[in-house]
Amino acid sequence: MSKKILTVDDSASIRQMVAFTLKSAGYEVAEAVDGNAGLSKAQGAHFDLVLTDQNMPGMDGLTLIRSLRKQNEYLATPILMLTTESSDQMKALGRAAGASGWLVKPFDPQRLLDVVKRLVG
């Protein structure tokens, strides 16, 4: 049974690259265009991992993480930030919100797969 991953990013090209990389490795992938859409999709199904960008219209990644962490089914679910933000301050805010890890764009597909495998097996 493949692991289900939700990728949330307002960039269609990033979502497509992430989805292609993960699907090629055997993961099942759902996509959302922003934090609000991601939260809606997450509430309708359980995902084994959530990947989110930080800077998106409507609801940013940190707000999405905080919202997911308030739900019992996402208390222990790995949530990975995949963003252009790379400052130590932003990473600290991510950890405080409940992020399980942080990757900076542009991302290396093999590094993404290594981190995802470490987080979901």
Image: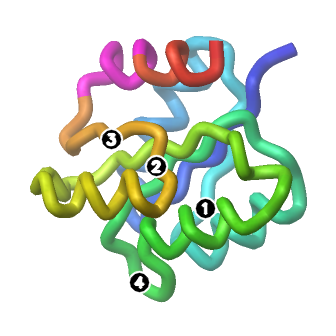
Which residue is pictured at 56% across the width and 48% down the height? 7
Residue range in magenta is 108-114
Query: Alpha-carbon distance for marks 4 and 3?
Result: 20 Å
Tell me which label, 1 or 4, sits earlier in the chain: 1
Residue for badge 3: 102
- Foreground: disc 4 or disc 2: 2
**Residue 78 versus residue 94 in the image, above or below:** above
Taking depth in this image into account, of 46 and 66 the one nearest to the observer is 66
Q: In what element is the residue under mark 3?
A: strand
Examine the structure image and report whether residue 96 is included in the region drawn in magenta: no
Residue for badge 1: 32
Which residue is pictured at 64% across the width and 46% down the height? 6
- For the image, the number of numbered tags is 4
Examine the structure image and report whether residue 109 is included in the region drawn in magenta: yes
Residue for badge 2: 99
Q: Would residue 38 appear left or right of 102 to someone viewing this image?
A: right
Tell me which label, 2 or 1, sits earlier in the chain: 1
- Amino acid at pointer 2: Ala
